[in-house]
Image (cartoon, helix red, strand yellow):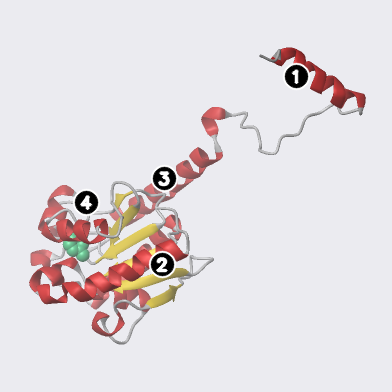
Amino acid sequence: MPNTSKHSLAILNYYKSFGVETHIQNKPRIRFKNYSYNESKKEILNDQLKELEKKMINLDCELKLKAKNFVFYDGLSKSNIMIIGEAPGYEEDKIGKPFVGTAGKKLDQMINAIGLDRKKNVYITNIIPWRPPNNRTPTENEINFFLPFVEKHISIIKPKILLLFGNVSSKSLLKLKDGITKNHGKWFNYKNPFLQNKIFTTCIFHPSYLLRIPNKKKIAWEDLKKVKEKITSLRIKT
Ligand code: URA
C-alpha cells in the first residue's frame, strides 16, 4: 500500500521545484457551503414569486370578491416545463392550488404518461387566479387584465418548454386568430416583453374537454408524444 502523505509531499515538492506556489483547481471551490450558487438562485426566484403573488393578491378585481382562495401555482419553481391552464374550478378554489379536481387528475395522468410529474419536474399555473362564478369561461376583459401578470410569471420561471392546456391560455398567450382545434400539437416560439429568449410552446387539449369528449384523447396523446420528443431532442433536464 503506498504511503499517501509521503507521495503527496513528493508531488508538492516536485511542483515547488518549478516555482509553483499556488494550486488552481479545474472546478471552483465552494467556500461558502451554506450559500451555494443554486441556493441563492432559488432564493431570488422565490422572492420574485412572492413579490408577484403580493401584487396580484392586492389587485382590484371583481372575481376575488366571489372566490374563496387565490390560486397561484403548484409544482416546482425550478422546473424546465411550465403548464398554463384556464382558471380554478370548485376544488381549486377550495384548496388554493391549480388542477386539483377531476380535470387535475386527468392532467396528472396525461403528463405522467410522458414522464412528467407535478411533484418532480413541472410548474403549473392558470391565466386567471380566482375562480369565475359557476366555472364560467373568463371574459376577454378578465383575460386581458391578467395577461401581463401571467407574462411576468413566465419570465420568472423561464421554462424551456411551455405547455398551454386549452383554448383560453393558447389563444391569449400566442395571440392566435384560430383556436386550439387548428393549432394543437404545433410548435410556436413564444416571446413576451419580459423575456430575453423565446420559449418552445405548444397547445394541448384541456383535460376537461377530454373528459367531456373522450374520442379526442387519441389526438391529445399524439400531441403529448411530440412534447416528449422535444424534451428528448433538446436534452431538457426533467
Ligand atoms: N381547469 C383549469 O384550467 N385550471 C385549473 O386549475 C382547474 C381546472
Nearest the eye: 93 or 57: 93
The answer to which quarter of the image holds residue 143 is bottom left
Under mark 3, the amino acid is Asn
Q: Residue at x 34, y 52 (%)?
A: 53
Q: Name which of mark 1 and mark 2 comes first in the sequence.
A: 1
Q: Quick one: label 4 or label 1, which is nearer the N terminus?
A: 1
- Kindly identify which numbered label has been placed on residue 8: 1
Residue 236 figure quarter: bottom left
The residue located at (35%, 67%) in the rendering is 227
Assess mark 4: CB under 8 A from ligand 1?
A: yes
Pointer 2 residue Cβ closer than 8 Å to ligand 1: no
Mark in the foreground, 4 or 1: 1
SS category of the residue bearing label 3 = helix
Residue 62 place in picture, x, y as percent: 19, 64
Q: Residue furthest right?
A: 18
Among numbered discs 1 and 3, the one appearing first in the sequence? 1
- Residue 97 is marked as 4
Residue neighbourhood size for the residue with mark 1, other residues' Cα within 10 Å, grouped as few (<14), some (14–19), many (≥20) = few
Name the residue beneath numbered marker 2: 230
Extreme-front residue of the structure: 1
Front label number (1 vs 2): 1
Instruction: Pick whichever of labels 4 and 2 is earlier in the sequence.
Output: 4
Of circles 1 and 3, the one toward us is 1
Q: Quick one: label 4, few (<14), some, or many (20+) residues within 10 Å?
A: many
